[in-house]
Structures are given as C-alpha cells and as structure tokens.
Image (cartoon, rainbow, N blue to C red):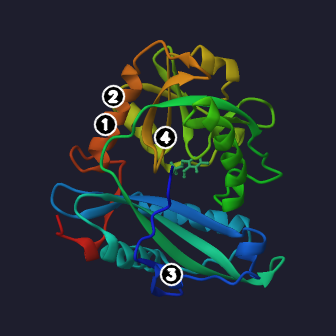
Amino acid sequence: MAQLQRPASVYMKGKLVPWEEAMLHIGCEAVTRGLNVFEGLKGYWQPDGQFMILMMRQHYERLKRSARLLHIPCDYTFEQYHDAVDQLIGTLATPDRDMWARTTLLVTDGHWGENTIADFVVTAYHQEKQPPQSIHLGVSTWRRSGDLALPARIKTSSNYQVSRLARIEGRPLGYEDMVLLNQSGRVAEATASCLLMVRDDTIATTPATEGALESITLDIVEALAQSMGVKFERRPIDRTELLVADEIGVCGTLHEVTLATSIEGLALPQKSPILSAIQRRYLDAVRGLNPHPFVELTSLPSVKGRQ
Ligand code: PMP
C-alpha cells in the first residue's frame, strides 16, 4: 500500500520546520475550500555530482498563472522560490535517491476572495532512480471538469478529487492509472499526467483546450520528438482511437515517460518502439547523460557535490 513519506522537515512561513510542527488552522480557506495552487518538481543527480531541478522556471511561471486564475496573491520572486527548494532539499537529499518536491501556495487567511493571504510551503520526498515501470491503463467513468467548472489549466488540489475517484475506480480492475474523458467524451488526460498515443508513426496528444493541464513534460517530449525526427501533433483524441492505437503512454514530471502495456484490458499491439525511444532520450537528458537544449536544469547549490 502506498504510504506518504514523512521527511524530517518542510519549508513554511519562510523557514524550515520539523514535519510534526507543520500545522495549518482548520478554519483557513486552504482547509475549508481546499484552496491552494501547487507544482510538482523533480530533481536529479547529475554526472558531475550536482543536484538539478528540471524546468524550475517553467514550474514557477505555471504556479503564478494558477494563482492568478484563483485570485491568490503570489509575490514570491523566482529567487525566493529557488531558495526555499534549495534549503529544504539541501537538508533532505541523499546520494542514492532523486527527489520530488511539491511547492504549494496555501491560503492561510481571507474569506471568499477578500483579503486573501497565502503561505508558500515546500515538501520534498525521495524517489527511486529506476526508469518508470510500464502500466495497465483504464478509462474512467468520471469526467475531467470543463473550463467553466474547475478549469484543468489551474493546478489546484480540488482538481485531483476526480483523479482520486478515477484511481479508486481503476484499482480493483487492475489498472495502475486511468484516462479521464472530458465533458464531450473525448480524451482529456490521465489522473496526474498527459496522454501520449502513437498512430501511423506519429505521436498525438490532446491540447489543453480538451481538458488537460498545460504540461511542461509534454513540451519536452515535443522538443525531443522534433530532434529525433518523430512527428508530434496536438489534436482531439477519441476514446475509440485509444483502442486501435499502436502505442500508448503517459507523461508528466513525476511519471516522466511511462509506457502502457494495455488499454482497457486490450494488449497494445507493438512493444512501444517510438515511446521507448522517447523515454530513453528523456531520461538521458534529465540525468545530464545526454543534454538537450530544450531541457533546462537548475542547480541547487546547497546539495552540490554530495555524490
Ligand atoms: N495533468 C495532470 C492532471 C497533472 O497532475 C500533471 C502533473 N503535473 C500533468 C498533467 C503533467 O504536467 P507536467 O508535465 O507539467 O508535470
């Protein structure tokens, strides 16, 4: 059973705080309305011994866009954002593991959008260095909400209620992850990643307007595909297309590029030649083994030279 790690410290109120003391008042909007915006960042050890965060500036910019859409003030600079992650990972990183950090703006004060105050908090968890394992993918009966309900473009916890329901639905059926359809019954994305489908040697994925998060990993996959001479397109995807696809996978900061071996119980016909090549190129780029100009890595000086 999945257990949330309990690392020694978290970052909140501008400083490192022991895990047990990281408290929030039950009356604040972060609790009563689940009001927050967040980003999941991945950090990798590099061959020269540095510890680097993948696409940190892009995550910071998306956090600000989510905050703007929910009217949550975000006056933290990129330098403050970087410093908080650096401080926390500096105390938690170990040479044998990568890290996943969650950077969140939690609404600690205010009421119905008036006098809103948010605290910037960071938690970080250890990650195994192995490439992601292939998964069986289902299609959920739950739907991604529309742009006028709970917009998928906003990365906020409330958006993950449906993802949670979809995973609960998929687990007894043997699916490690689920595709969510949008309000029109076309593919939106997976529960915490975007969908990749290969047909006729072309990688297709859904645009954000179909109910997907504006994914940073997708932009990387697109850039890698371009430099590998693989066609890549963003277009609507029907549910039945998934069932006749040559290859399927998902991608996201945490999932990296994960391959599916089956979709709704049907085995995929090919052993994912295109998506496995993308997966290998992705992992080589983020680990600094074969850098790619599109893949930006930001150093965390506090964890420098540990490896
Ligand atoms: N969709 C959802 C719902 C997600 O939670 C994520 C993970 N952040 C993604 C897509 C992929 O986004 P990214 O590549 O920016 O991590």
Q: Secondary structure at mark 4?
A: strand
The first of marks 3 and 4 along the sequence is 3
Q: Which residue is mark 3?
A: 20
- Where, quadrant-wise, is the C terminus in this rendering? bottom left
Q: Which residue is mark 4?
A: 251
Q: Position of residue 279 (x, y in %)?
A: 36, 35
The dot on residue 177 is none
Distance from Cα at disc 1 to Cα at disc 2: 6 Å
Instruction: Choose the circle earlier in sequence order: 3 or 2.
Output: 3
Tell me whether the residue at label 1 lies in contact with that at label 2, contact meaning CB atoms closer than 8 angstroms: yes
For mark 1, what is the residue? 281
Is 150 drawn above or below residue 142 in the view shown? Answer: below
Q: Could you give the CA–CA distance between mark 1 and mark 4, rounded to whole angstroms? A: 13 Å
How many C-alpha atoms fall within 10 Å of the one at disc 1: few (<14), some, or many (≥20)? many
Q: Which amino acid does the dot numbered 3 rest on?
A: Glu
Q: For residue 120, what is the image quadrant? A: bottom right
Q: Is residue 95 left or right of residue 123?
A: left
Q: Position of residue 108 (x, y in %)?
A: 68, 82
